[in-house]
């Protein structure tokens, strides 16, 4: 395959920024993706180089781009394919550097993934994974590729695949991590990584499947001291991309029972027998306790489901199912922890697709432990996609299947409160311990209607006199009905406070000497 062949493929939609005919006729020997400033030692002659240009910034001098391209020229790279996503376009200084050093430069649009380019080259030249020849010492040996293909076909778990993939390198420490730092697999020489620490390593790790959602990404992580040729890492990553696709197919096949269960729970009255059968079909126990969580992100359905499943997989020993709700949002039913599973979770790495995950550092056990664990994990979930805010609401424990409908109502109420809260955007119904928190769970239109009816004419905020009376009312209630402290806070005479409160009582029809009327107006102020 030649460089010019890539330009002819409409599916890739590449653009030539610079390159003379002899350069475009160069044969491609392989592909390396890198964002190192000086990648020369990892490149082989004839490779095309994919770069997202993370190493470059607008503040950099021309010498930075020149060093990068000079390294490509020195290694005999066939061409540079630069992604437009990081900077919106390929910097002109890079075009000039490629022109000086005689390196063909192609731009890669945002909608074309590096994996699509890699697959195009390898499938054209080498065929599928099991038939690729050992082109050089910088690719997986043929016997290793064959073994990994057999293991994939036999349904081997990620830990076995990872260990065998790097065994010929002396089994260096290596982790397969999720988007939130959950350890999916690790070699025997790799230490256990808490999720928070692992998530900080993702910036330097290799994405397994760039096409996945921000919450469904997997990463290969090797410590900085371990040097493995990039092409070899990409081949190992492709093994896990194939494994992940198989896991997703199995997961999709299991969604029908989950959708049926959530539909039964969402119905106000469900017979006990169908509900018990639906729980059994989902692999959940027919006795509680259960916890229900509802998530909303504003993202597409599959992405939202990825986010919820990813955070729940940190819960050691818990089984769960997720499904889209007819009323909007994605919900999960979480069963109480299996004591035996929870106790052994730290001794192994859970297979992808299972609810538990070893090395996450998250507790199993009681429903209260579930809530605490999810609150600790929520910042890791938010970090996956800075453009999206995941909101979540968690129910109180449901003791029996018959209580699941009420738990779903609670979780939805807590979700509404989470949308209005400042902080981690995850609220448990048990957090609603104040009047303000309780009211925050009401739908916005209900809050508005209550405020208008309770405040009467004072709800008209466009009237300056009414705004003044509302301020006085708010201060009066804040100071527990103390005339003197209200007057002091507003810098008014006590008689003026008496006059204004009298006007409030007249316009609202409430008697502020009564506690229930005070509570009504306080609630109305909180609903504004």
Image (cartoon, rainbow, N blue to C red):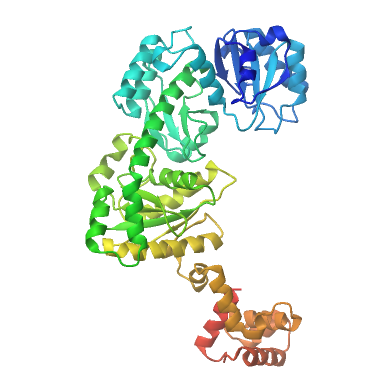
136 or 246, which lies in front?
A: 246
Q: Is residue 403 above or below residue 132?
A: below
Q: Is residue 169 visible?
A: yes
What residue appears at the point 75 percent right and 17 percent down from the top-left corner? 97
Quarter-of-image position of residue 428: bottom left
Quarter-of-image position of residue 461: bottom right
- Quadrant where the N terminus is found in the figure: top right
Residue 248 percent coordinates (x, y): 39, 36
Q: Is residue 432 above or below residue 316?
A: below
- Quadrant where the C terminus is found in the figure: bottom right
Residue 324 percent coordinates (x, y): 42, 52
329 or 356, which lies in front?
A: 329
478 or 179, which lies in front?
A: 179
Residue 497 percent coordinates (x, y): 69, 88
What residue appears at the point 54 percent right and 25 percent down from the top-left corner? 116
Q: Is residue 450 above or below residue 173?
A: below
């Amino acid at each position: 395959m030649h460089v010019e062949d890539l330009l002819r493929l409409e599916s890739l939609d590449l653009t030539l920024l610079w390159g003379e005919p002899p350069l475009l006729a160069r044969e491609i020997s392989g592909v390396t993706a890198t964002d190192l400033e000086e990648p020369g030692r990892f490149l082989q002659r004839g490779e095309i180089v994919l770069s997202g240009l993370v190493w470059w910034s607008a503040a950099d001098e021309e010498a930075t781009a020149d060093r990068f391209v000079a390294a490509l020229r020195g290694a005999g790279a066939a061409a540079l394919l630069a992604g437009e996503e990081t900077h919106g376009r390929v910097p002109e200084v890079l075009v000039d550097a490629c022109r000086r050093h005689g390196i063909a430069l192609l731009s890669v649009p945002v909608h074309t993934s590096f994996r699509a380019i890699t697959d195009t080259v390898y499938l054209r030249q080498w065929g599928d994974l099991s038939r690729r020849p050992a082109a050089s010492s910088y690719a997986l040996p043929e016997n290793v590729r064959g073994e990994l293909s057999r293991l994939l076909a036999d349904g081997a778990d990620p830990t076995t695949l990872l260990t065998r993939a790097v065994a010929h390198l002396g089994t260096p420490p290596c982790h397969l991590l999720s988007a939130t730092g959950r350890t999916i697999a690790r070699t025997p020489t790799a230490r256990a990584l808490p999720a928070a620490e692992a998530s900080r390593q993702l910036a330097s790790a290799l994405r397994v499947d760039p096409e996945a959602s921000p919450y469904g990404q997997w990463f290969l992580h090797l410590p900085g001291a371990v040097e493995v040729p990039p092409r070899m890492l990409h081949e190992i990553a492709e093994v896990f991309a194939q494994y992940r696709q198989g896991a997703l197919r199995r997961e999709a096949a299991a969604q029908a029972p989950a959708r049926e269960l959530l539909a039964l729970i969402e119905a106000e009255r469900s017979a006990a027998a169908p509900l018990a059968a639906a729980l059994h079909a989902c692999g959940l126990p027919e006795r509680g306790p259960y916890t229900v969580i509802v998530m909303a992100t504003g993202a597409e359905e599959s992405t939202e489901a990825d986010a919820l499943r990813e955070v729940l997989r940190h819960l050691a020993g818990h089984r769960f199912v997720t499904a889209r709700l007819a009323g909007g949002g994605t919900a999960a039913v979480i069963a109480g922890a299996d004591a035996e599973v929870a106790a052994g979770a730290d001794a192994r790495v859970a297979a992808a697709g299972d609810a538990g995950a070893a090395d996450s550092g998250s507790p199993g056990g009681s429903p209260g432990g579930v809530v605490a664990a999810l609150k600790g994990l929520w910042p890791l979930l938010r970090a996956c996609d800075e453009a999206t805010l995941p909101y979540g609401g968690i129910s109180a424990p449901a003791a029996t299947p018959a209580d699941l409908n009420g738990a779903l109502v609670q979780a939805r109420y807590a979700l509404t409160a989470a949308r209005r809260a400042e902080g981690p955007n995850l609220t448990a119904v048990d957090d609603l311990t104040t009047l303000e928190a309780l009211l925050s769970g009401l739908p916005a239109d209900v809050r508005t209607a209550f405020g208008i009816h309770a405040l009467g004419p004072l709800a008209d905020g466009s009237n300056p006199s009414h705004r003044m009376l509302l301020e006085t009312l708010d201060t009066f209630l804040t100071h527990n009905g103390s005339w003197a402290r209200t007057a002091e806070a507003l810098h008014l005479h006590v008689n003026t406070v008496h006059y204004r409160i009298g006007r409030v009582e007249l316009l609202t029809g409430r008697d502020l000497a009564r506690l229930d009327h005070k509570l009504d107006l306080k609630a109305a102020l909180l609903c504004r």
